[in-house]
Image (cartoon, coloured by chain):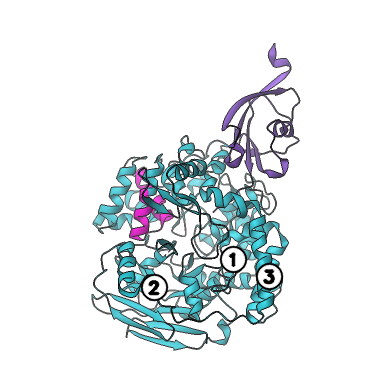
Chain colours: A cyan, B purple
Amino acid sequence: MVKIIRVNMTDRTVRVEPVPEAWVGLGGRALTSAIVAAEVPPTCHPLGPSNKLVFAPGLLSGTAAANSGRCSAGAKSPLTGGIKESNAGGTAARQLASLGIHALIIEGKPNGEGWYRVRIDGNGGVVEEETETIGKGNFAVLEAANRRWGEEIGVITLGPPGEHMMAIANISTKDPDGKLRSFGRGGLGAVMGSKRVKFITLDDSEASNIPLVDRRAFLDASQRFAKTLVDHPVSGQGLPIYGTAVLVNILNEVGGLPTRNFTSGQYADHDKISGETMHDTIVARHGEPTHNCSLGCKIQCSQIYNDKDGKYLTSGFEYETIWALGADCCINNLDHIAEADAVMDDLGVDSIETSVMFGVAMEAGVLPFGDGEGVLRLLREEIGKATPLGRILGGGTAAVGRAYGVTRVPVVKGQAIPAYDPRAVKGIGVTYATTTMGADHTAGYAVATNVLNVGGKVDPLKNEGQVELSRNLQIATAAIDSTGLCLFIAFPALDIPDCLASVIDMINARYGIKLTGDDVVALGKKTLKIERAFNLAAGIGPEQDRLPEFFELEKIAPHDVKWDMPTEELQSFWKGFGD
Amino acid sequence: MLSEGTVTITVKLFASFRRGRFREASRDYFAGARIADVVADLRIDPKDIGMIFIDGKHADPDRTLRAGDALALFPLLGGG
């Protein structure tokens, strides 16, 4: 029996409810955004009692579909002030789906100084006081949960910066190796901290298999789908071997690798932090270059990176983190970056927001560019301990820029810009400016078509065709984000027609419905319109759909380009939705 | 002069293209050589090519090389 679980932190009750008709056909991002838009007043304080934190598995989560392990988390973001969806791999999606939980809603806010844990199982859940793990990092929470409830227990956890409601705080979840994956962006950890929830456990030990209306059709479609993932060179070879860090050399080559706080498009030491170098280092130290973050993943873009003594240092070592600490902060040492990645996992902070923040902090003179030891110290001793400096840094990129009078602050709607300079990759600039999520590269990954020649070709240095490209990708992405499938299926989906066709067949076979490709597009569009309406009501108007001024004033090498898309062209993005 | 009949370029290879070949090398080609000729010379299967850049901008295989070009060849790759 599929249900909605509401955890009320004001009176510490847990209610199990049937799924309302309007939410039945929704999952993942479509569902979290629908719930947030329906139940959260857009003008509420994101850390107050009226905000809600919603977790939802995707439409295919919990099934045998390959790459169906993504879970969505949504709320009003303390970082952007608008609606936010963030998704993570790991074990949470499968466990929530197995428990028949369509959505888990955390609402209200407790009085007093106490902290709580929430324990969810097949019957519902309880809210209990928690003391042992308060003030401790995410790895200590996992260890405590394993000790108390066994190694199979699922965990969604908050680190100390989240307890202190810092806007860089993320929410993390256990992965199949007992390590961490994160709902990274938008400060959702601060929302969880405002409701004084340190962790949530998911006990699916008594759960039964997910029912499939047409089992045979599902298995057929599932095999076709898996084949497209293996057949496409990006998902079948490039990502498994090199991980996402393979992008370092690509972006450096096209002059779109933001370097030294977005003052150049190329980094002289790019070879020291490249995916090729990371691969060779991992192999030499007997790590794992090919590794998955959730069960059933065929793409396996993660890795296990060991230190020089062959001991585990970090996993899920992503292009974004390596770019931001490497090129943007000029730390030319993969081991320093890996150690910082591990610290950020344990603290539970967004590795994009935190690292781009450090780039602005370096420009402000808080520490020198290239100071890897300094970054580690600031993470552990200041952010980790919530000192006054730690709280300033923990406010994120825009907050640090404001505190130190820096004008070169790469954010949109308050969220840090990721690893692609919009002046040299104009399509991603449109996505950064227009997505409801704030500067977000995954929301409409125009890099694929601007640079990687996937899904066609649009010249990255020209404005032509970029708005339409970004719009189509944003719609498709909102739909994929609702299925529980990893966004990297988009690479085969853009080039192999049977990929999306088999996804639709799997959804239809699972639920006994008859969706078409048009229905899937409609779901993506509807989700974006709901999000847009929320943002407008929250006070984030069309004038916020723009990039920071410095991109228009400053050229970057090597192509000596500025951001010069006419405002009317950028504003036409949302007009294409029939605003 | 040697330069009359040849053009000297820099060739940069990435990811799996480096295997059994090199990372970066200076190479001479006959005047009028195209990118496709470099690909053939390196025994790279054209089907495996994802991206071709000359001086950081997209280039087509039938483009003629010019002295001083920096040619970068990538397999089909992606990420996020």
- Tell me the distance, in whole angstroms, between the alpha carbons under discs 3 and 2: 31 Å
Which residue is at the front of the view, A437 or A578? A437
Chain under numbered label 1: A
- On screen, residue A142 versus residue A558, left or right, reads left
Q: Residue A135 carries which label?
A: none
- Tell me the distance, in whole angstroms, between the alpha carbons under discs 2 and 1: 22 Å
Q: Label 3 neighbourhood size at 10 Å, few (<14), some (14-19), many (20+)?
A: many
A115 in magenta: no
Secondary element at image label 1: loop
Kindly identify the amino acid type of the residue bearing the numbered disc 2: Ile
Image spot of residue A196 (x, y percent):
31, 74
Image spot of residue B68 (x, y percent):
63, 25
Secondary element at image label 3: helix
Do the residues at discs 3 and 2 belong to one chain? yes
Q: Name the residue under label 1.
A: A66
Q: Give the range drawn in magenta.
A: A339-363
Rendered position, A386 above or below A330: below
Image spot of residue A51 (x, y percent):
40, 75
Q: Label 2 neighbourhood size at 10 Å, few (<14), some (14-19), many (20+)?
A: some
A348 in magenta: yes
Which residue is at the front of the view, A374 or A413? A374
Q: Name the residue under label 2.
A: A153
Q: Name the residue under label 3.
A: A221
Image spot of residue A184 (x, y percent):
44, 61
